[in-house]
Image (cartoon, grey):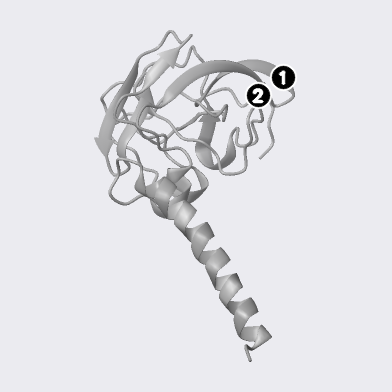
Amino acid sequence: MRHPKIIIAGLGLAAVAAAGGITAASVGSSSAASVSPAQATVHTARATVHTARATVAGKAETVLVNGRGLPLYYYRPDTATRSLVTGGLAQLWPPLTSAAPAATGVSGKLAVLSGVNGQQVTYNGHPLYTFADDTAGQVTGQGVQNFFVVTPGLAPLTTSAAPAAPAPQSGVGY
């Protein structure tokens, strides 16, 4: 006679294994050898960056978004040659990575910075990130931890180590 608890436990393990297999397959299909779960959500072979309307601090703005419609941010302390977002910070602010990014409807320069986050997409020299708490069309990270939403008119970063000019706070009290 079979034991019902063993059968149920076996079915539970099979379901967990199947779910894990789906996750492993989707991460494994990326071109990166080792991708964290947060990075896997934004890593694609060809990232697409385009503009969309979103509410930023109660005001409708045109912002840059990734292919899934998630708002893109820049980190003020970054330089044009180095991303400073790693570890736990990169878990909250996953870098947008791609070997071949494409842009639609943006006037700035899209490029790739090879560094600590792999092949990270930049806009006008600013490494790009999403925010773990955002959904498509929703900007919740404006001004949080020195991250600011990217607009099409974002001034280019120079290659010097000097910090970028401060972005307007838009009255957000974080």
Secondary structure category for the residue under label 2? loop
Q: Residue at x 48, y 52 (%)?
A: 22
What type is the residue that disc 1 sits on?
Answer: Lys
> Disc 1 marks which residue?
59
Is disc 1 in contact with disc 2, using a CB cutoff of under 8 Å?
yes
Judge by depth and name the residue closer to the eye, 114 or 168: 114
Q: Is residue 113 above or below residue 131?
A: above
Give the percent coordinates (x, y) of residue 14. 53, 68
159 left or right, relative to 138: left
92 left or right, relative to 137: left
Q: Which mark is residue 170?
A: 2
Q: Which mark is residue 108?
A: none
Q: Tag 1: Cα neighbours inside 10 Å, few (<14), some, or many (≥20)? A: few
Q: Residue at x 54, y 15 (%)?
A: 51
Q: Is residue 81 something that shows in the picture?
A: no
Judge by depth and name the residue closer to the eye, 141 or 12: 12
Secondary structure category for the residue under label 1? strand
Looking at the rendering, which quadrant does residue 44 occupy? top left
